[in-house]
Amino acid sequence: MTETALESLARMVGNWTTTSDLYPAMTGHTTIEWMSDARFLTVRYTAPEPGLGRTWIVGADDLYLDRLMILQYDQRGEHRVYQGSFDGPLWRVWRDAPGNSQRFTGSLDETGNTLRATWERSESELDPRSWEHELDIVYTRIP
């Protein structure tokens, strides 16, 4: 049987330090873990001010096992729904919303200890191919 996207994402389970080009002097912390029933993953990101903490609940739909469904809540009280995939080293997350589309593209290195990712945003309702760089993030596994 082929591994599902959620099963593939399990290789990210653990604790990670998180740095970004937006706030180079700040280090955040990300914890990725299974919920008690092992059917959903939680991704919790915390950072000192002015960083923005967020929580993701990650699961899959029985009909689309190659696709992740992600519910997000952040410190500002915003709720968002994303789709995603995790295939080999590539982790993709996206949200297609008029005037506020977002996408995350990350690549896990061969050791499984560093993920380099980029967030991009499109505010254009007329040209959804018009993406602007938002920030780069590096996740480093804590041994």
Image: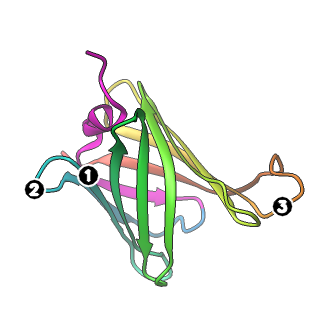
| Label 2 close to label 1 by CB (< 8 Å) | no
Locate residue 42 relative to residue 81 in the image: left or right.
Answer: left
* Figure colour scheme: rainbow
What's the magenta region?
1-21
The question of residue 16 being in magenta is answered with yes
**Could one spot residue 19 in this view of the protein?**
yes
Q: Earlier in the sequence, mark 3 or mark 1?
A: 1
Q: Earlier in the sequence, mark 3 or mark 2?
A: 2
For disc 1, the neighbor class at 10 Å (few under 14, some 14 to 19, many from 20) is many
Q: Which residue is mark 1?
A: 41
Q: Which residue is mark 2?
A: 36
Residue at 49% over, 42% down? 116
Quadrant where the N terminus is found in the figure? top left
x%, y% of residue 91? 47, 38
Residue at 77% over, 51% down? 131
Q: Amino acid at mark 1?
A: Leu
Camera-nearest residue between 33 and 66: 66
Locate residue 43 relative to residue 120 in the image: left or right.
Answer: left
Quadrant where the C terminus is found in the figure? top left
Q: Amino acid at mark 3?
A: Glu
The residue positioned farthest toward the left in the image shown = 36
Q: Secondary structure at mark 3?
A: loop
For disc 2, the neighbor class at 10 Å (few under 14, some 14 to 19, many from 20) is few
Q: Secondary structure at mark 2?
A: loop
